[in-house]
Structure formats: structure tokens, C-alpha cells
Amino acid sequence: MSGKEWRLGRTPEFTHQLDTRIDGVAVFDVMMKVHGGKIEEATIFSDALFPDVIDEAMKALKGAEYGRSGLALFKVIF
């Protein structure tokens, strides 16, 4: 994106889809809606056998900072 929001240091609203696999655990399809540099909403689809953990991960990601530090939370949960 080359809009003035990026040039002026403001992050426009966008979505990001992340597919990842943790060997021996599950495959995860994570869709995040980001606004103002924070994850506004996270939806996770997975073949994991523990749906409660997936629900907790979605709650934990909501409001987290988008970027390496915020997404590191995802790795801590799993």
C-alpha cells in the first residue's frame, strides 16, 4: 500500500491470513482483522483436538499488538 496512511505512520485497517502447522499438534488457519496496529478480531480454524484451547487463543489475540511481539503470543499459547 502506498497511501498516505502508511507514509504518515498510521496503519490502515487490513486483514491477514496465516497458515501454520505445529508438528504433532495441528494445522492452524488464522484470520486476523487489524485496525490501528492492533488485532481487532481473530478467527482460528484448526483440526486440533482441543477446541477450548482454540477459543482461548482467539480471545488472547484480540487486542494484541500486530507484529512480532503480538504474534509471539500465538506461539506461547501453543
Image (cartoon, rainbow, N blue to C red):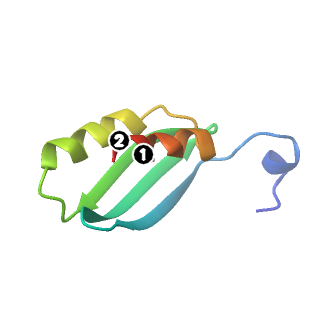
Q: Give x and y (percent) for residue 14.
A: 58, 53
Amino acid tagged 2: Ile
Q: Give x and y (percent) for residue 65.
A: 57, 35
Contact (Cβ within 8 Å) of mark 2 with mark 1: yes
Q: Give x and y (percent) for residue 23.
A: 31, 68
Which quarter of the image is occupied by the N terminus?
Answer: bottom right
Q: Is residue 78 left or right of residue 18?
A: left
Position of residue 11 relative to residue 28, above or below, is above
Amino acid tagged 1: Phe
User: Quadrant of the rendered structure where residue 9 is?
Assistant: top right
Q: Residue furthest front?
A: 24
Residue hosting label 2: 77
Residue drawn at the location 31% of the way across and 41% of the way down: 57
Q: Nearer the viewer, residue 16 or 13?
A: 16
Mark 1 element type: helix
Residue drawn at the location 52% of the way across and 44% of the way down: 72
Residue hosting label 1: 74
